[in-house]
Image: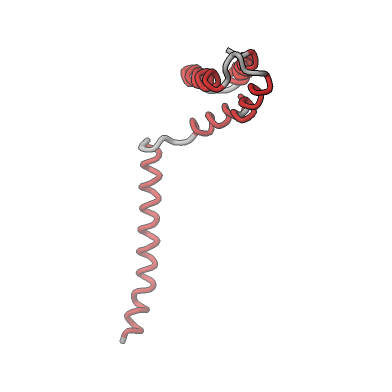
Amino acid sequence: MHRLVDEYLERFDAAAAATRLPDGRRVGLRQEIVDNLSAAIPESATDAAADQVLAGFGTPAEILEQERDSADAEPVGSPQSRARVLTTGAVVIVVIALLLAAVLPLALAFAR
C-alpha cells in the first residue's frame, strides 16, 4: 500500500476509536476504505497523485460522520419506521375527515 494510504488509515483508526461505532461496523468500514484506496492508489503512485485521490475521498472524520448519520437513521421496515408511517397515516385520515365534515354541509347548502 502507498505510504499516504497507510497514514490515512492511521488517522481513520484514531478517529474511529473515539466514536461509538460498533466494532463490527468499524472493521467493515475500514476494510471498504482499504479496498477502495488500494484500487485507486497504486503503491507506485506519486505523493501528489495519492493526495489528489485522498482529497476527493474525504477525511476519516467526514466518513465516520456519514456512517454515524446513516446508523442513526431508522432502518426501513423497522418497528419504529412502521409505527411512524401508521401514525402519520392516521393523522392524515383524521384531518381529511374533519375537512370533509366542515366542507360537505356547506357544499350541500350551496347546491340547493
The answer to whether 97 appears left or right of 4 in the picture is: left
Residue 104 in picture, x, y percent from top left = 34, 74
Q: Nearer the viewer, residue 66 or 98?
A: 66
Q: Quadrant of the N terminus?
A: top right
Residue plotted at (49% across, 30% down): 71
Tally of marks? 0
Q: How is the image coloured?
A: secondary structure
In the image, is 112 to the left or to the right of 72?
left
| Residue found at the far right of this picture | 48
* Residue 62 locus on image (x, y percent): 61, 30
Vertical side of 35 occupied by 68: above or below: below
Q: Name the residue rendered at 58%, 30% in the picture.
A: 65
Does residue 53 appear anywhere in the picture? yes
Give residue 83's position: percent from left, percent from top: 37, 42
Quadrant containing the C terminus is: bottom left
Instruction: Indicate the position of residue 8 as horizontal and vertical percent values.
Output: 63, 18
**Would you place residue 102 above or below residue 84 in this image?**
below
Residue drawn at the location 55% of the way across and 32% of the way down: 66
Residue drawn at 38 percent across, 46 percent down: 85
> Does residue 22 show up?
no
95, above or below 103, in the image: above
